[in-house]
C-alpha cells in the first residue's frame, strides 16, 4: 500500500478522535492517508473517516517504560510494516520516544517526519513551530489557547500546500462516519426500557479518567431530577463497565426515572445511543469527543488538570 501520509496518534481515545479533522483536511487536499493507533482502539475501524485500513501497533511495544529488548521488537515490527506500507511522509502527533522511534523507522528519511521524530544521530527532533507548541501544551496543559484538534491540523498543514487557508476552516460537526444499522437497532433496544418519555433523552457520562476530574454523582442526580421534572427529558447513564459503581450510586440517590446503559455498549453502539439524545452532559472524556464528532450539543464539565481551551469538544 502506497500513501502520501501516515498519521501516527498513540494517545487516548478522545485524542484519537481529534485526529479526524486532520484526516479530513488531507483527504480534501487529495492526499492518500491512513492512521496508526494503539491496538486497543482497533474497534474504531470504520468510525474515523479516511483511515481505512486502520493500522494498529501492539500496546506493549510503545509503552513509555520500554526496555531495550522491547525497542528491538518495535524496530522489527516497524520494518515488517514498512514492507507492506510505504508512506512519503509520516505525521507523528505523539511526542513519546517509542512513537518517535516508530515514525523514524517508517519514514523514508528523518526529514519526512512532520511533528515528532529523531534526527540522523537518534536525537529527539521537532519539525515546525506548531509541533513544538503542541509538545509544550501537553507538558503544561494550562498554557494552550488552541484546541488540540487544530494543533494536530497545523502539524500536518505543510502537506496541504496553498490549500491550507481554505481547508483549515472553523470547527464543524458530524465529521465521524455513520454508525450502521446494527448499532442503531441496539441503541433503540436499550432505550426501549425507558419510562414514558415526553421530550426525549439527555445523556450523562458520570465517569472520567481520574476521580478528581469527575463531577460528583450527587450533582448529576440533582440535574437529572430537575431536567425530568421541569422539561420531561429522561436521563440516560453512559459509561464503561468499570464505571458501574457510579451508576449504582446514581440509582441509589435518585427518585426520578432514568435509563442505565453503562457497560452495555461498544463504541459504535455508544455512538448510536448518543444519536438518540437531545444533549450530553459529560466530564472530559472520550465520550465527549465522540459526541462532538457526531454533532451532538454538549455541556462539558472540566475539573482538575483538564482545560477546555485545548481539550474541549471540537464544536463551534
Image (spheres, grey):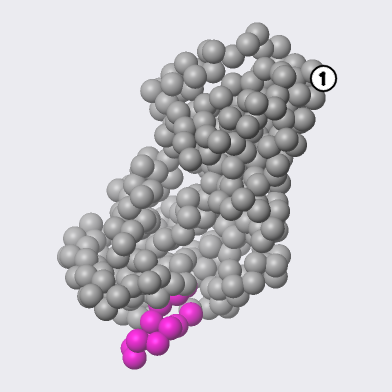
Residue 125, magenta (yes or no): yes
Q: Which residue is depicted at the point 80% across and 24% down? A: 226
When asked about the image quadrant of residue 203, the answer is top right
Q: Which residue is depicted at the point 70% across and 51% down? A: 302
In the image as oriented, which residue stretches furthest toward the top?
A: 196
Is residue 62 visible in the rendered image? The answer is yes
Residue 232, magenta (yes or no): no
Is residue 173 visible in the rendered image? The answer is no
Residue at which label 1 appears: 230
Image coordinates of residue 307 in percent, x first then y, are: 69, 59
In the image as oriented, which residue stretches furthest toward the right?
A: 230
Label 1 packing within 10 angstroms: few (<14), some (14-19), many (20+): few
On screen, residue 222 versus residue 108, left or right, reads right
**Is 111 situated above or below 43?**
below
On screen, residue 86 versus residue 154, left or right, reads left
**Is 303 situated above or below 63?**
above
Q: Main secondary structure of the magenta part?
A: strand
Residue interval drawn in magenta: 114-126
Q: Which residue is depicted at the point 62% across and 38% down? A: 206
Instruction: Tell me the quadrant of the picture where the N terminus can be found.
Output: bottom left
Image coordinates of residue 254 in percent, x first then y, are: 70, 24
Q: Nearer the viewer, residue 10 or 228?
A: 228
Mark 1: secondary structure: helix
Q: Nearer the viewer, residue 225 or 25?
A: 225
Amino acid at each position: 500500500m502506497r500513501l502520501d501520509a501516515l498519521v501516527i496518534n498513540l494517545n487516548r481515545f478522545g485524542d484519537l478522535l481529534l485526529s479526524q479533522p486532520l484526516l479530513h483536511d488531507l483527504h480534501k487536499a487529495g492526499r492518500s492517508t491512513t492512521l496508526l493507533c494503539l491496538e486497543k482502539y482497533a474497534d474504531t475501524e470504520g468510525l474515523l473517516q479516511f483511515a481505512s485500513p486502520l493500522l494498529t501497533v501492539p500496546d506493549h511495544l510503545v509503552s513509555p517504560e520500554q526496555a531495550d529488548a522491547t525497542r528491538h521488537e518495535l524496530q522489527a515490527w516497524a520494518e515488517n510494516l514498512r514492507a507492506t506500507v510505504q508512506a512519503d511522509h509520516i505525521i507523528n502527533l505523539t511526542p513519546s520516544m517509542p512513537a518517535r522511534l516508530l515514525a523514524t523507522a517508517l519514514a523514508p528519511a528523518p526529514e519526512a517526519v512532520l511533528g515528532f521524530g529523531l534526527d540522523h544521530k537518534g536525537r529527539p527532533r521537532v519539525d515546525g513551530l506548531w509541533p513544538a507548541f503542541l509538545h509544550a501544551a501537553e507538558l503544561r496543559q494550562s498554557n494552550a489557547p488552541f484546541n488540540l484538534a487544530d494543533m494536530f491540523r497545523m502539524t500536518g498543514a505543510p502537506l496541504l500546500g496553498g490549500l491550507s487557508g481554505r481547508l483549515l476552516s472553523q470547527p464543524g460537526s458530524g465529521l465521524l462516519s455513520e454508525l450502521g444499522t446494527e448499532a442503531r437497532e441496539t441503541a433503540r433496544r436499550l432505550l426501549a426500557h425507558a419510562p414514558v418519555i415526553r421530550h426525549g433523552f439527555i445523556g450523562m457520562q458520570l465517569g472520567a479518567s481520574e476521580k478528581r476530574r469527575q463531577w460528583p454523582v450527587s450533582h448529576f442526580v440533582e440535574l437529572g431530577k430537575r431536567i425530568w421534572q421541569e422539561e420531561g427529558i429522561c436521563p440516560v447513564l453512559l459509561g464503561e463497565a468499570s464505571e458501574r459503581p457510579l451508576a449504582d450510586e446514581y440509582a441509589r440517590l435518585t427518585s426520578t426515572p432514568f435509563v442505565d446503559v453503562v457497560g452495555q455498549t461498544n463504541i459504535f453502539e455508544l455512538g448510536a445511543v448518543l444519536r438518540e439524545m437531545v444533549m450530553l452532559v459529560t466530564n472530559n472524556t472520550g465520550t465527549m469527543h465522540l459526541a462532538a464528532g457526531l454533532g451532538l450539543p454538549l455541556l462539558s464539565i472540566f475539573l482538575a488538570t483538564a482545560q477546555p481551551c485545548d481539550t474541549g469538544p471540537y464544536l463551534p
